[in-house]
Structures are given as structure tokens and as C-alpha cells.
Amino acid sequence: CMWQQRSVDTFLGLPFNIMSYAVFTHMIAQCANMDVDELIFNGGDCHIYENQLDACMEQLSKNPNTVKLPTLKLNPEIKNISDFIYDDIKIEGYESYPTIKAPLSVGL
């Protein structure tokens, strides 16, 4: 799956976008009886705001190998993309570091 995005707040928005499109890719693959291969992001204005730099540096100091990767579980009985409901999608074993707060910006 490939998605193009004109503009994205890299620190606050892009992680949510990656997760959303990854789940959507798995849903499409299940309904089309296909395997998932790649998720490709093509970003235009990818930016980090100055008032988010400290939070970004804190994130970069974390070792991602100290937490286990989660597992995505979809209801295997769903074969039509329109039939998915919230309860058909589960993310199991999610672990994370504590929340890093950063201000939401509308531009500087």
C-alpha cells in the first residue's frame, strides 16, 4: 500500500498516520485474500516545529528494542471492507515508553 500526504506534522501526526494506514492495509489484504508486503509513505511537507524539538530529541533517545512489537488481530470472518466494526480490530501486546508531551502547532 502506498499513500501520499501533502503535509504532515512528523512528530505528532505521522505516527498516527502510519498506524492507521498499516491497519487499513491489513484490512484490505484480508478482504482481497492477499498478503501484506509493504507500506510506502510519500510525504511532501514533512516538518517538525521548533517547539517540538525537545520532545523529538527525547523520542530519539529511546531504544525501540526494549519493548516487544504488538500483534494486529483482525476478525478473520470479515471478507468485505465495509463490514469491519471497531470490535473486529485488536492490537495485542502493545508496550510503550511513557507519554512524551509536545505542543500541537499551527505554524510558527
Image (spheres, rainbow, N blue to C red):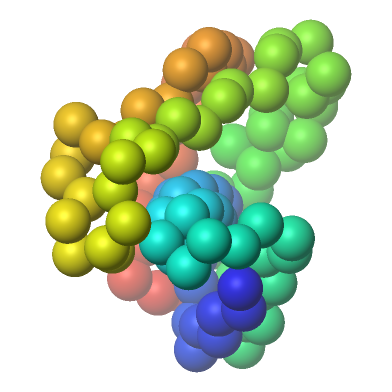
Q: Nearer the viewer, residue 29 or 5?
A: 29
Q: Quadrant of residue 69?
A: top right
* Residue 59 placement, left or right of 8: right
Q: Is residue 101 above or below residue 8?
A: above
Residue at the spot 79% in from the left edge and 10% down from the top edge: 66
Q: Is residue 44 visible?
A: yes
Q: Is residue 21 above or below residue 11?
A: below
Q: Quadrant of residue 50?
A: bottom right
Q: Is residue 12 visible?
A: no
Where residue 86 appears, x then y in whole percent? 18, 39
Residue at the spot 61% in from the left edge and 73% down from the top edge: 1
Q: Is residue 96 above or below residue 82?
A: above
Residue at the spot 39% in from the left edge and 38% down from the top edge: 76
Where residue 2 appears, x then y in whole percent? 62, 78
Residue at the spot 45% in from the left edge and 30% down from the top edge: 73
* Residue 65 placement, left or right of 38: right
Label tally:
0
Where residue 38 appears, x then y in whole percent? 73, 64
Which quarter of the figure is the C terminus placed in? bottom left
Q: Nearer the viewer, residue 37 or 3?
A: 37
Q: Is residue 72 above or below residue 8?
A: above
Q: Nearer the viewer, residue 70 or 29?
A: 29
Where residue 103 appears, x then y in whole percent? 38, 46
Q: Nearer the viewer, residue 82 or 108?
A: 82
